[in-house]
Amino acid sequence: MHITLIATIHAESGRANVAELRAILDRLAPNVIFAEVPSAFLADYLHGSYGTLESAAVALYRERRPVNVVPVDLDKPGEEFFSNTKDMFKKVERTSADYRRLVDQNSLDTLKFGFPYLNSDRCAQAWDGIYNEALASVDWIGDTKLRQTYDLWNQTNDDRETGMIENIESHCIREVPARSVFLVGAAHRKPIIEKVQKRKVAGRPEVFWDFESALK
């Protein structure tokens, strides 16, 4: 069971674009694509109306090769969650010049270097810096509700990452894919790698995760 993780973004930016992701898929030639999308949205993802870089690249890939697209994300939280999270990051952005600088640098590197950057340790470190500064800013603001929003957002991402790994493992137990890839937002790459490594120690189902091939 071989799974290549491809860290991506949801909207095109410079060299991180549909054509580049399709080229990666063509090179890896998967017969299964694990998608960061809840099952309820799979039809939109496949039919090109989901509106993300990944779904557009997968649609082009499917025109040339038969592939099974498997949704592995958890159900989306309610609108209140997204509204509160958006407001929280807006307050962080207004509060912290360091946060704005880190986000701008990450965006610039994504635009200039594309998928090799998104799948690099440098990008993982950038996201660590962004989220550490966000938490520091939330604590500096000192609003209890804002900290509760941050904690819920953080726990939701943690649950999603664990859930996606479990869903992939479950699929691989039922059907052993010859070649598969997992398309997931770059901010999740490092946490997923860490969770996979912990699950190996815990004796979880043996799945070979490849975190390097997207860079080649």
Image: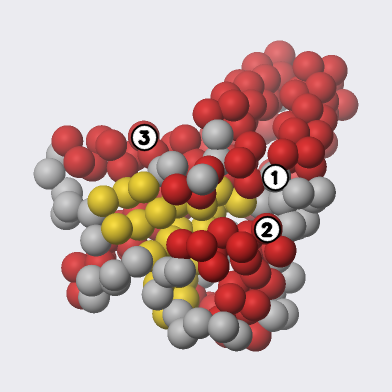
Residue under numbered circle 1: 114
Q: Nearer the viewer, mark 2 or mark 3?
A: 2
Label 1 crowding class (10 Å Cα cut-off): few <14, some 14-19, many 20+? Answer: many
> Mark 3 vs mark 1: which is more N-terminal?
1
Residue 65 position (above or below residue 153)? below
Query: Which residue is at the far left?
Result: 203
Q: Secondary structure at mark 1?
A: loop
Q: Secondary structure at mark 3?
A: helix
Q: Please identify, in this view, whether the residue under mark 3 or under mark 1 is nearer the observer.
A: 1
**Label whose residue precedes the other's in the sequence (2 or 3):** 2
Q: Is residue 74 above or below residue 51?
A: above
Specify whether 90 is left or right of 186.
Answer: right
Is 117 in front, or is 38?
Answer: 117
Q: Point out residue 9 in the picture as x, y percentages from the top left corner.
A: 66, 51
- Residue kind at label 3, given as amino acid type: Glu
Q: Residue at (78%, 38%) from the top-left corner?
A: 112
The reply to whether dot 2 and dot 3 touch (C-beta < 8 Å) is no
Seen in the image, is 7 located left or right of residue 114? Answer: left
Measure the alpha-carbon separation of dots 2 and 3: 27 Å
| Residue tagged 2 | 20
Q: Amino acid at mark 1?
A: Gly
Q: According to the image, label 3 marks what residue?
A: 194
Q: In terms of sequence position, does the residue under pointer 1 or pointer 2 come before the other?
A: 2
Q: Residue drawn 23% across and 75% down?
A: 175
Neighbour class for label 3 at 10 Å: few (<14), some, many (≥20)?
Answer: few
